[in-house]
């Protein structure tokens, strides 16, 4: 008999999803509503883009409205992305211990139900996207190519985390375009910073599944880098900080901007010191801590803005 109450092992214990009506729980699990870290990691680059646009002189109270829209949009589109990923990966998920209880492989939802849910989420996301200017809309629509290809990358390359980096940080470009009506070199530097940040945190995440991935033939940076993971992660973190620095320099940021990057640098160092790539719980804990890392990076443009608000 299908288990309609099962949650995946990495879900947040006692989350609101488990208190939702029984019919809704499989859909909420499909959208990873019981694992909010993914929404944060998709949303935070949007906040970066809005804040950097404000540093570039495109500030105003309307940015708070945009931040609200993007918060809803990140939740919805992260759910849509997860639904699509689970549809494509349903056979692989059934063979991996951590993912076997996901709604499709566990039989909580059919593929047709998942597709219907995916379409509904995409329509909500489209309504939100259409609230922005033409450049932001076109930029947002362009991300669909990256989203469509992502689930297949682990079949062909050991660097699917790089494709995820291109996909998950696209919101930084959409947000900057929404706030400023254009895309500048500074916006692309910020996007590149997010790319390396994703390489950092998702390589840590991938070490949870490396044994199962090796058995079923799925590729990842965890398998590619192996025992060399820590020095590579240090490089990814350094590139994240360097590109954040470049984004500020392109906008003639004050010294406050660069000093405000130090807490994020300290957080990356802490993660590297604590990381045990052979301990799945340790990897998951550090992966989740990147919500805090993302907000610490946001401090740089926010601190740059504070003197102008006083």
Image (tube, rainbow, N blue to C red):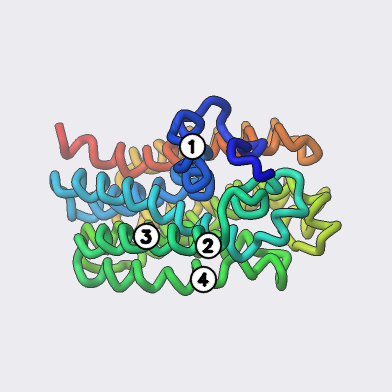
Do the residues under discs 4 and 3 have CB atoms within 8 angstroms? no
Q: Kindly identify which residue carries mark 4.
A: 148
Badge 2 marks a residue whose secondary structure is helix
Residue 85, given in percent of the width and then of the height, sits at 57, 60
- Label 3 vs 2, first from the N-terminus: 2
Badge 4 marks a residue whose secondary structure is helix
Do the residues under discs 3 and 2 have CB atoms within 8 angstroms? no
Q: CA distance from mark 3 to mark 2?
A: 12 Å
Do the residues under discs 4 and 2 have CB atoms within 8 angstroms? yes
The mark tally for this picture is 4
Category of crowding for the residue at label 4, using alpha-carbon neighbours closer than 10 angstroms: few (below 14), some (14–19), many (at least 20)? some
- Relative depth, front residue between 269 and 67: 67
Q: Kindly identify which residue carries mark 3.
A: 120
Residue 223, given in percent of the width and then of the height, sits at 79, 56
Q: CA distance from mark 1 to mark 2?
A: 22 Å
Looking at the image, is mark 1 or mark 4 nearer the viewer? Answer: 1
Q: Kindly identify which residue carries mark 1.
A: 22
């Amino acid at each position: 008999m299908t288990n309609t109450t099962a949650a995946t092992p990495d879900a947040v214990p006692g989350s609101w999803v488990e208190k939702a009506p029984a019919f809704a729980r499989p859909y909420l699990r499909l959208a990873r509503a019981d694992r909010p870290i993914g929404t944060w990691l998709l949303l935070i680059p949007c906040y970066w883009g809005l804040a950097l646009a404000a540093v570039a002189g495109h500030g105003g109270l309307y940015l708070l409205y945009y931040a609200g829209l993007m918060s809803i949009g990140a939740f919805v589109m992260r759910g849509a992305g997860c639904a699509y990923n689970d549809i494509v990966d349903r056979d692989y998920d059934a063979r991996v211990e951590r993912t076997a209880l996901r709604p499709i492989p566990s039989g909580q939802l059919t593929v047709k139900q998942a597709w219907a849910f995916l379409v509904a989420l995409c329509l909500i996301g489209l309504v939100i996207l259409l609230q922005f200017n033409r450049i932001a809309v076109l930029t947002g629509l362009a991300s669909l190519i990256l989203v469509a290809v992502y689930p297949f990358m682990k079949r062909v390359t050991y660097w699917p985390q790089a494709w995820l980096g291109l996909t998950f940080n696209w919101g930084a470009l959409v947000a900057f375009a929404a706030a400023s009506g254009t895309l500048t070199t500074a916006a692309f530097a910020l996007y590149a910073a997010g790319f390396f940040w994703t390489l950092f945190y998702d390589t840590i995440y991938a070490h949870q599944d490396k044994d199962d991935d090796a058995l079923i033939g799925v590729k990842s940076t965890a398998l590619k880098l192996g025992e060399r993971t820590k020095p590579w992660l240090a490089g990814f973190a350094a590139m994240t900080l360097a590109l954040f620095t470049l984004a500020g320099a392109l906008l003639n940021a004050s010294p406050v901007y660069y000093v405000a990057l130090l807490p994020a640098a300290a957080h990356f160092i802490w993660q590297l010191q604590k990381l045990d790539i052979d301990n799945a719980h340790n990897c998951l804990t550090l992966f989740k801590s990147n919500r805090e890392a993302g907000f610490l990076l946001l401090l740089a443009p926010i601190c740059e803005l504070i003197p102008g608000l006083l």
